[in-house]
Image (spheres, coloured by chain):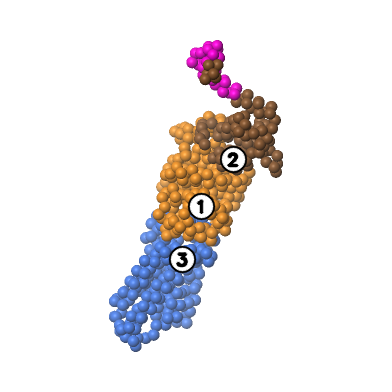
Amino acid sequence: MSVILSVKSGIKKFGRKQVLDGVNFELPAGRIVGLLGPNGAGKTTILNTVMGLYRLDSGEIQICGEAIGYKSKRLMSYLPDTNHLFTWMRVSDALHYYTDMFPDFDRDRATELCSLLEIDERSRTQSLSKGELERVLIMLIFSRKARLYLLDEPLGGIDPLSRNKIVKTIFSQLDTESTILISTHLVKDIETLLDDVLFLNNGKVIYSGSADHIREDRGQSIEDCYMEVFKNA
Amino acid sequence: MLKLLKWNFIDYIRKYYLILLGIFAANIVFSLFFIGSFSIDFSFEYGIPVYRFYTGERLWVQLCIITISLLSISSWIERRTAPLEASVSMPPWKILLSKILIADITSTAVISLSGLAVYGINLIANPSVQPYYWISRPADDFSVILLYSTTAILAFIFAKSFKLTRKYPLPATGIIYIVVTRIYGMIYWTHVRSFPIFPETGIIILFVAALFILGIMLYKYRFQIR
Amino acid sequence: MKYNPTAPIYLQIIEYLKKDIVTGKLAAGERLDSVRTLSDRFEVNLNTMQRACSELEKQGAIITQRGIGSFVTDDHEVISALQNEMSGGLIDLFISGMQDMGFPEETIVDLIRKALKR
């Protein structure tokens, strides 16, 4: 199995705050991985750093074996926890933008996802509800054929109907060549999604393992395991 | 590259068309009422060939240029839409070039058009006013504005590339910009003025190229949004 | 589909599929949908579904023919063995529950007979 993402000894300080304090992990292909931890643990920072918005003070990040740089961005599809689209955009504008700027964007799949997720292409992104917006953003990033999908809090504050649709879309995206990394502090909501988990606390990975191992060998749900690990952290 | 330019321009205009109109109108008002007297002769002085390189005195024009340049990098300042740009796989020079061109073309358009408007107003008041060289003026303006808008953008990138200045990016940008433009002024007065055979355009091109290369280096190795 | 988060999900899927096979909802020899379709229907991760299917294959409940597809076993011995296995579990659960409450053997048998007549 090839390694999609590898982070070695990632260290990052913002002013006085040590946000990443030696982060080490590897993501193999074909898995849905949960990056779990409380707010402020460094989850968004890791995602932003992999995307090149921040730089590590020291450490190494590799995507599919190549060091991160502008070229490696074509392998990644990022869903930030904010609305990162231009304010004036309608969904149709966003579709045009993505078609123009991302060669791996599949317009047919986008149309398919739009109907699955019940998205109206003419709607203004600024006037959508949280759930509707999240569905649009998910549709956009999953219409791209990337090796690594980075989702930052995709299910936070979303209504159950949208949530269901989003989860189904995430599932359908998985194939043997790509990996989906979901960062969240809402462990319960994504319990049944995950293949593997990474627990992040204070900028360090304090636990990593597969969901099956947690259930089979520890006899716990991921949430139980999380509570136990973090209580002792 | 073209797609990048297309979308950056669309976003820029849709977000800031009101500000640009405001600058356009303010420029007219400023030229008519502050620089020269209404109706006597053509009073929008900016762009008179003799002052091509050095616009130091024209703080008002500088303000226009720096505002427009910073608007072009607004997505970096605002940070909300930065992830979208960051997702696109483009080499640094294309990204930088696109931002510089947006700032440059927009400022040239705003300034030249307002100049034309002032000329038009003067023409109405006094039909025998000197002719406005409609083609050559914007072309002249373009190269100088290129220099100053590149400087403004570079100042921001520089500020965001070093730990010390990253904390206060906007003041740092302002200071760097002022310092560098003073330097241009000094160069102008000591060399270009004294040796008129020195090709001004040549110096501008040299500076812009140097800034551009510096910008690419910084953007590639040191620039961070936060 | 609701899953118990403290037990491996693939095991829960296996139980569900076995039940279908035993009750005949999935007929002997019937062709199964693709793993992807199944994972969609069960609302689980593809990997989880994959694991469930591999495990079922190991146990002989499913037979995969490369290039053709996956089929429920048409070996009726296997199916009745499955039936026994599943019912055994149910029976054990019932008996231990009743015994915990203090019912002796004959009473349990009587109660079952009466309940079946209803």
User: Residue, x 64% and y 36% (percent of image)?
Assistant: C54
- The chain displayed brown equals C
Q: Position of residue B80 (x, y in %)?
A: 43, 55
Closer to the camera: disc 1 or disc 3? 1
C-alpha distance separating marks 1 and 3? 27 Å
Amino acid type, residue under disc 2 in the picture:
Leu
- Read off the residue under disc 1: A114
- Which color is chain A depicted in? orange
Look at the image and tell me in which quarter the N terminus of chain A lies: top right
User: Residue, x 66% and y 36% (percent of image)?
Assistant: C30
- Read off the residue under disc 2: C38
Q: Position of residue C29 (x, y in %)?
A: 68, 35
Q: Position of residue A133 (x, y in %)?
A: 44, 51
The single residue placed furthest to the front in the displayed view is C118
C-alpha distance separating marks 3 and 2? 47 Å
Q: Position of A79 compared to B24: left or right?
A: right
